[in-house]
Amino acid sequence: MKIAVTGATGTQGGAVARLLTERGHDVRRVTRNPKHPNDVHGDFDDPASLERAFAGVDGVFLMTPLSDPNEVAQGKAAIDAARHVPHVVFTSATNADRGTGIPHFDTKAEIERHLAANHPQWTVLGPAAFMGAEGPVALPIPPDLKLYVVAPEDIAAMTVLAFEQPERFRNRRIDIASDRLTGPEMAAIRGTEFIEIPLAKAERYSADLAAMFRHHTEIGLDLDIAALHAEFPEVGWHTYADWIATRTS
Ligand SMILES: NC(=O)c1ccc[n+]([C@@H]2O[C@H](COP(=O)([O-])OP(=O)(O)OC[C@H]3O[C@@H](n4cnc5c(N)ncnc54)[C@H](OP(=O)(O)O)[C@@H]3O)[C@@H](O)[C@H]2O)c1
C-alpha cells in the first residue's frame, strides 16, 4: 500500500513510517523540510501542499502538532485534502471525545468530529501519554496515581494493523495504552527518582497540560487495557519495563 505519513519526522509519525517501511509498504514521509528520498513537502498551513502530498495514496496517517493555535484548522484542512484517500487514521488522545475541558483534548475532539462527518472510512486512535526514557520522572501527579502510558511503537503497530485490516478498524475510535503504572514505579524501572511537581507550578508552565494532569488525578481516564490487548494481541504491547530495556540494550 502507498501511505502518506504526516509528522514523519516526529515521534508517532516516525514510528509509523518505520514500521510501514519494514512491512514493505510504500511510504511518503510528509514534512515541511524534505531531506530524504521518500520525503514529500507538506505543510498543515498550506492545504495545496497537502493535496499534492496525499495524491494517489491508499491511506493517510494524520497527526496534528501540539498546542499550535491553528490545530483545529490544520486538522480539518488535512482531512479535506484527504477526501479522496480511501482510509484516514487520525491519532488523537485518550478520552479526547469525552468533553474533558482539557484544551488540547477538545481541539482533537473537534478534528475527530470533522473526520467522522466528512470521510467514509476513518479510524481514530486515542493514545495515552507516550513512554519516555530521559531524566527523572517529574510529573504533577500524586505518587500513588497509576498513569496510562503507550509505546510509540505500539501506536505504530495499531496504525499499520488499521491500514492492513481496514474492515476491522472501519469507522472506529479506539483509545490505546500499553501499560499503567505510578510515577515511582516508572522511576524505579529507569533507576531514577520520582519528583512530584506541584500542580500550581505546572499551571505556570502550561495551563493546558496542568488541566490534563488535574483531570488524570481528579477524574481519571477510562480505558480497559486488558480488553484492548485481548482484542489486538498482534500489536505485541510493550510493558514499560520492556520498552525501557529496548532503549538501553
Ligand atoms: N506526548 C504525549 O504524551 C502525547 C500523548 C497523546 C497525544 N499526543 C499528541 O501527539 C501530537 C504530537 O505528536 P508527536 O509527539 O508524534 O509529534 P512531534 O514529535 O512533536 O513532532 C511534530 C511533527 O509535526 C510536524 N509539523 C509541525 N508543524 C507542521 C506543519 N505546519 N505542517 C506539517 N507538519 C508539521 C513536524 O514535522 P516537520 O517539522 O518535519 O515539518 C513533526 O514531524 C500532539 O497533538 C499531542 O497532543 C501526545
Image (cartoon, helix red, strand yellow):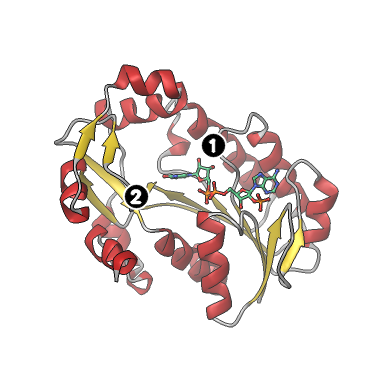
Task: Examine the image and state in which quarter residue 198 appears.
Answer: top left
Q: Are marks 2 and 1 in contact (CB under 8 Å)?
A: no
Q: Amino acid under label 1?
A: Ala
Residue designated by label 1: 109
Say which of marks 2 and 1 sits in front.
2
Residue beneath the point at 73% across and 55% down:
33
For this rendering, which residue is in front, 231 or 158? Answer: 158
Give the total of numbered labels.
2
Left or right: 105 as drawn, with respect to 62: left
Is residue 238 among the parts visible in the rendering?
no
Find numbered disc 1 in the image and state the secondary structure of the residue it sits on: helix
Disc number for residue 134: 2
Label 2 neighbour load within 10 Å: few <14, some 14-19, many 20+: few
Q: Give the percent coordinates (x, y) of residue 24.
A: 59, 82
Q: Give the percent coordinates (x, y) of residue 233.
A: 32, 71
Residue beneath the point at 14% across and 36% down:
144
